[in-house]
Image: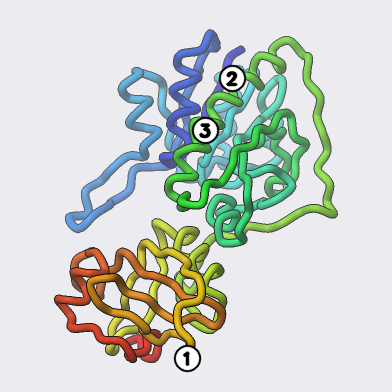
Amino acid sequence: MRIIFFGSAHFAVPALEALIESKHELACVVTQPDKQKGRHLQVTGTDVKSTAVLAKLKIFQPENINSQESVKFLKGLDADLFVIVAYGQIFSQEVLDIPKIMPINIHASLLPRYRGAAPINWAIINAEKKAGVSIMYVSLKMDSGPVILQKETKIEEKDTAVSLEEKLRYLGAELLIDALKIIDSRNYRLLEQDEDKVIIAPKLKKEDGLIDWAAPAVNIHNQVRGVLPWPGAFTGYRGKILKIFRTEVLPLFSIHKPVPGEVVRADKRGLVVACARGFLEIKELQLEAGKRMSAQNFIIGHKLIAGEVLGKTIQ
């Protein structure tokens, strides 16, 4: 089949690499325009563009995928299939109608659960035990098209959104090749999604990282894991923002009833904070304008003591 690949983010790279190695013809790679990044505002292409350049593929970087210029260009490529993975623009029906067979997408959830921009993050925040990828027919309504194939994987206790994304991007690439085989043979079914089971996974906001110590320890632990790499979990400490990267839920720790956010241990054995229900050991953290470090080094460097309360003040 003759395929146009649409992708931009890191998540999409294994799928593009799998297509490059497949028997199918890649007519073009469509990715977001180059942008200024970093402290020095260097103009940089997407991760997908870097892969496409190395493979010497035709590259198209429109500002607007739905412009008449883009439509004319895409129609001229005479594609059988569109493969869309973490591209970053919403498609018009006119564009979706271009491929001879269909447009398909790799979505990082077990649809209809977790439609939206941040399915991996919300699966961990919500304490799901499994995640997965879906290959779906792309329709105009976000992530609502019928599903062609799905594959699930276990969410491990130590998984973060970063580690789970790494698993799912390769799982998605494998499933894509399986989907192409059945699409090419016309031996596939389009399974409509059950609208009664839809869960939305909206794009994360900065405030999604703010820790509420009045929540149960396990909820905060899942939040810390789920909001990586951005916005990251954070709280207040002596008038500054304290970022928290790694935690562990502890069993009953103290016989007295500390207030939520109170530090109940700060010594060489570790840093433990009280929550509304349970206790959370903080293992890795970073104070505003400081370096990321272990809890033990933080306690020594900042003279943190038991009895202090986190989250009271944030500048």
Residue at mark 2 to residue at mark 1: CA–CA distance: 57 Å
Q: For the residue marked with disc 1, what is the amino acid?
A: His
Q: Which residue is mark 1?
A: 256
Q: Which residue is mark 2?
A: 177
**Of pointers 2 and 3, the one earlier in the residue sequence:** 3
The image position of residue 182, as x and y in percent, is 71, 16
Q: Who's the residue at 51% across and 41% down the image?
A: 87
Q: Which residue is mark 3?
A: 6
**Of pointers 1 and 3, the one earlier in the residue sequence:** 3
Of residue 216 and residue 148, the one placed in the foreground of this image is 216
The image position of residue 204, as x and y in percent, is 52, 63
- Which quadrant would the C terminus be assigned to in this image? bottom left
Q: For the residue marked with disc 2, what is the amino acid?
A: Ile
Q: With respect to residue 268, does 58 lie above or below? A: above
Circle on res. 194 = none
Residue 134 located left or right of residue 112: left
Of residue 86 and residue 278, the one placed in the foreground of this image is 278
